Image: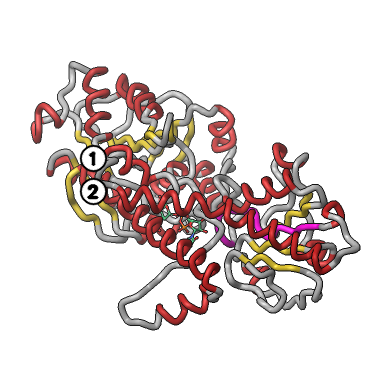
Amino acid sequence: MPFSTISVIGLGYIGLPTAAVFASRKKNVIGVDVNQNAVDIINRGQIHIVEPDLDMIVHAAVTEGYLRATTKPESADAFLIAVPTPFKGENEPDLSYIEAASKSIAPVLKKGDLVILESTSPVGATEQMAEWLSEARPDLSFPQTHGEASDIRIAHCPERVLPGHVLRELVQNDRVIGGMTPKCSQLAISLYKVFVQGECIVTNARTAEMCKLTENSFRDVNIAFANELSMICDKLDIDVWELIRLANRHPRVSILQPGPGVGGHCIAVDPWFIVSKTPEQARLIRTAREVNDSKPKWVIEKVQLAVEEFLRANPDKTTQEVTISCFGLSFKPDIDDLRESPALAITLQIAQSHPGRVLAIEPNITQLPENLSGKLQLKTLEEGLAETDVLVLLVDHEQFKKLEHQTESKQKIVDTRGIWNKKNEAKL
Ligand code: SAJ
């Protein structure tokens, strides 16, 4: 067996499931994270993030002794780096977590080890990581200088799993393997074959980096197309959802769905990694980002119009007496993840500017995170429907789709997802 011990650096949304899946295949896994609290939670067999079924497999892996977490890297045969690549400055990728992770594993590297960068990265990041490792370990040889004869093998193998379906997609998705040399790729394949049932497809590191960015940019550009259509149709008095349904009957047309903007930690971020490297060429990709980022403001203006219309129809009421209910806070349907959510940003903005009551309805959470509890009132679906004048639908959760609520004729609806009865919809 080439890999008796595998180390995963960064125990977040990608690293922890990956570590747990290796452990479930009876590999010895050392998980490393700078967050002592996360390390303690994992060593108790619990999890600090939300992902269906992950708690069970982490619990089993820890109790059976295959998974252990620590803050300090230890010797292993393969290292997978799955740390964040956030922004710095004006949408520039920040590689400081990758740099810190590389420098932290360098002292424990030994001849024959494999280092894989899984974090979504701008083109060139894997070569940069190899440089950091080689600077820290001049006694070892690396692929950028020694090619196939190197002591250390390096590859970029981007994660491509969908939050909410991580455990299934980790195993079933095809995997892009971007080795710095063919031998690096071969070793990386033998590692992933421990659990990956999809195909492992070999390319070089730069293409693998660009492939991940391309997938998320493709989606962003296509969502921007749908969002732009929704704003055009609004001007032209056309129901955009009916329009998309009709256009999608064409055998070569498949338009995505408009919404209140693009959220999450990937699709709204990764296209900028392309733009920042090639600003002159990436014109469409940049514009798509701008279109999607402009959508929350457009929705807030629609809500203001709906309030005005409500007041015109109810001249005895003042703005302070108008209650607005926002349905959905998460960044996409049927999850409880509020991070980078346009629905949450819109709700907070409305709560800040509207002088009357603003109610938040999010059936996937039982209480608001501490930093939001002073700013929003979380209500049940029933309360949100009964006590409100303007209904703002932001996330197409199952619970909202199933709703058979007859809105009172006085109530106004702003539906950003096109799932509710349009009978009383405000003129948007
Ligand atoms: N959205 C729309 N309209 C649509 C589809 C999505 O407005 O028709 C919005 C959603 O509401 C959400 C955002 O886009 O706010 C992103 O949601 P998503 O489900 O499309 O994607 P993510 O961010 O959960 O996961 C993506 C996936 N990438 C692709 O599908 C190309 C996943 O496979 C990646 O692994 C993940 O990013 C990542 O980690 O990069």
Mark 2–mark 1 CB contact (< 8 Å): yes
Horizontal and vertical percent position of residue 103: 34, 22
Asked where in the image residue 175 lies, by quadrant, the reply is bottom left
> What stretch of residues is rendered in magenta?
323-333
Instruction: Looking at the picture, tell me which residue is in the foreground, 355 or 344.
Output: 355
**Residue to which mark 1 is pinned:** 155
SS type, badge 2: strand
Q: Please tell me whether the stretch drawn in magenta is mainly helix, strand or loop.
A: loop
| 24 part of magenta stretch | no
Percent from the top left, x then y, of residue 278?
26, 40
Up the image or down, 184 lies above or below 164; here it is above
Could you say which disc has been placed on residue 177 in the image? 2
Name the residue at 70% across, 58% down. 326
Residue appearing at x 23%, y 48% in the figure = 177
What is the three-letter code of the residue carrying label 2? Answer: Ile
Q: What is the C-alpha distance between the residues marked 2 and 1?
A: 7 Å
In the image, taking residue 363 as reference, residue 239 lies left or right, namely: left
Quadrant placement of the N terminus: top left
2 or 1: tag closer to the N-terminus:
1
Horizontal and vertical percent for residue 49?
56, 44
Residue 34 visible to an observer of this rendering:
yes
